[in-house]
Image (cartoon, coloured by chain):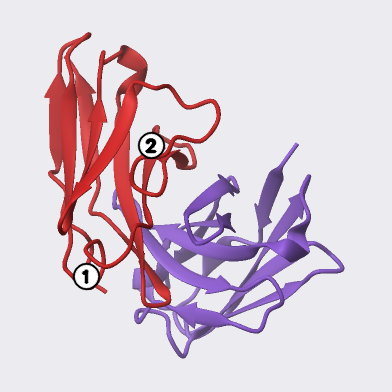
Chain colours: A red, B purple
Amino acid sequence: QSALTQPASVSGSPGQSITISCSGTSSDIGSYNLLSWYQQHPGKAPQVIIYEGNERPSGVSNRFSGSKSGNTASLTISGLQAEDEADYYCCTYASSTYIFGSGTTVTVL
Amino acid sequence: QVQLVVSGGGVVQPGRSLRLSCAASGFTFSHYTMVWVRQAPGKGLEWVTFISSDGGSKNFADSVKGRFTISRDNSKNTVYLQMNSLRVEDTAVYYCARDVSVNWFGPWGQGTLVTVSS
């Protein structure tokens, strides 16, 4: 149950696009289309922004998009805004367990 | 509205026990798998356990297996996390969340801090 691998930090200027990667193995990300992404602001509970790899729950901005290739998933934030500054976590289901990514801090310059 | 309220956190000595509760409202609780996720201070999220809608299926992270148990009372719309033989490394904010079709977790409770310290 090792954590999925994410970059510790990603930064961008307002209006730019950034991409966060989430690397796993053929036993987790590579085997299931059950990858979700969560946004967490300081002191708050996480909130889902992407599920099933590329689906957005109602109310989530279409500036957030997800994709997957092989054992790696990605979250792209387009038109970066100050409110996007937060921690982001990927998460996948795998063999009756769930595995979170190590987390990425997004900084808006 | 859909809401989860977590209670039961606090300071406890190593080796002791603590029970967390998560009360649900605004949705048909008995239809959903529920999960507990924790976050150590300054660290990332860690899935702890899940329990299926009828309580018949459960699983635990290796880090808590044999020490933590999960249960639910669908008549009270509440899920419980019983934590035994607590260790310093169990110190974390504990969140409960609804599992939506094995796809994603939401909503999340507000979290409760468990501090294991002598």
Name the residue at 17% across, 25% down.
A18
- The spot of residue A94 in percent (x, y) is 34, 71
Does residue A108 sit above or below B113 in this rendering? above
Please name the residue that numbered disc 1 is placed on.
A2
Residue B29 at x, y percent in the picture: 75, 59
Chain that bears disc 1: A
Count the numbered circles shown: 2
Of residues A70 and A46, the one drawn nearer to the viewer in this rendering: A70
Of the image marks 2 and 1, the number of the one nearer the N terminus: 1
Residue B90: quadrant of the picture? bottom left
In the picture, the quarter occupied by the C terminus of chain B is bottom left
Task: Determine the secondary structure under disc 1.
Answer: loop
Neighbourhood count class around disc 1 (C-alpha, 10 Å): few under 14, some 14–19, many 20 upward: few
Residue located 52% across and 64% down the image: B36
The amino acid on which the numbered mark 1 sits, given as a three-letter code, is Ser
- Image position of A89 (left or right of B60): left
When asked about the image quadrant of residue B21, the answer is: bottom right
Badge 2 marks a residue whose secondary structure is strand
The residue beneath circle 2 is: A39
Q: Which label sits on residue A98?
A: none
Q: Is residue B113 left or right of residue B30?
A: left
Among all residues in the image, which is located at the extreme bottom? Answer: B66
